[in-house]
Image (cartoon, rainbow, N blue to C red):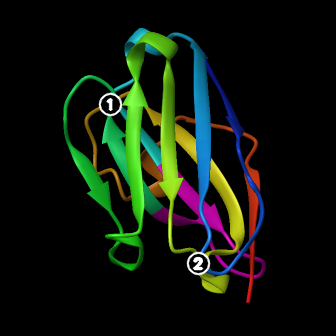
Amino acid sequence: QVQLVESGGGLVQAGGSLRLSCTASGRTFAIVTMGWFRQAPGNEREFVASIGWSHPTIVYTDSVKGRFTVSRDNAKNTVYLQLNSLKPDDTAVYYCAADLEFSAPKIRRNYDYWGQGTQVAVSS
């Protein structure tokens, strides 16, 4: 089992920044990839970014490239998502997820464990 806890969400104005954190516990040695997804009201959960737990591969969805940065601190079992130049369209609940196998990082069903989510709201 892997437990994931997100934090760092909040309400910001357009153009502002937030840093989300996701701390993993349990069988963290088994994690291959950590992903960030988001879900806006009425929409499906969509891929945002991913980072290898012990390999350097980083992937972003096109809409956040140049604005969001994913990183990790293995000593703290934590991954981060830095959100800059936020737009109202970025408003959503943001989830982190853990994949225990080498699989396509953008595919939601490939992830085995999910956090509870943290709300990000961007006002115009």
Q: Residue furthest left?
A: 56
Residue visible at 52% across and 35% down? 112
- Work out whether residue 102 or residue 23 is closer to the camera in this orientation and state it: 23
Viewport quadrant of the C terminus = bottom right
- Work out whether residue 52 or residue 112 is closer to the camera in this orientation and state it: 52
Q: Which residue is mark 1?
A: 101
Amino acid bearing label 2: Gly
First reached walking from the N terminus: tag 2 or tag 1: 2
Q: Residues within 10 Å of mark 2 (few under 14, many from 20)?
A: some
| Rendered location of residue 99, percent (x, y) | 42, 35
Q: Relative to 86, say whether 54 is above or below.
A: above
Q: Secondary structure at mark 1?
A: loop
Q: Relative to 113, say whether 57 is above or below.
A: below
Viewport quadrant of the N terminus = top right
Q: Are marks 2 and 1 in contact (CB under 8 Å)?
A: no
Q: Residues within 10 Å of mark 1 (few under 14, many from 20)?
A: some
Query: Image quarter for residue 87?
Result: bottom right
| Rendered location of residue 8, percent (x, y) | 71, 45
Q: Relative to 122, say whether 24 is above or below.
A: above
| Rendered location of residue 31, percent (x, y) | 40, 23
Q: Secondary structure at mark 2?
A: loop
Residue visible at 28% across and 55% down? 59
* For discs 2 and 1, the disc positioned in front in the rendered view: 2
Magenta region: 36-47
Residue visible at 45% across and 46% down? 35
Amino acid bearing label 1: Glu
Q: Which residue is mark 2?
A: 15
Q: Is residue 21 magenta?
A: no
Numbered circle sitting on residue 51 = none
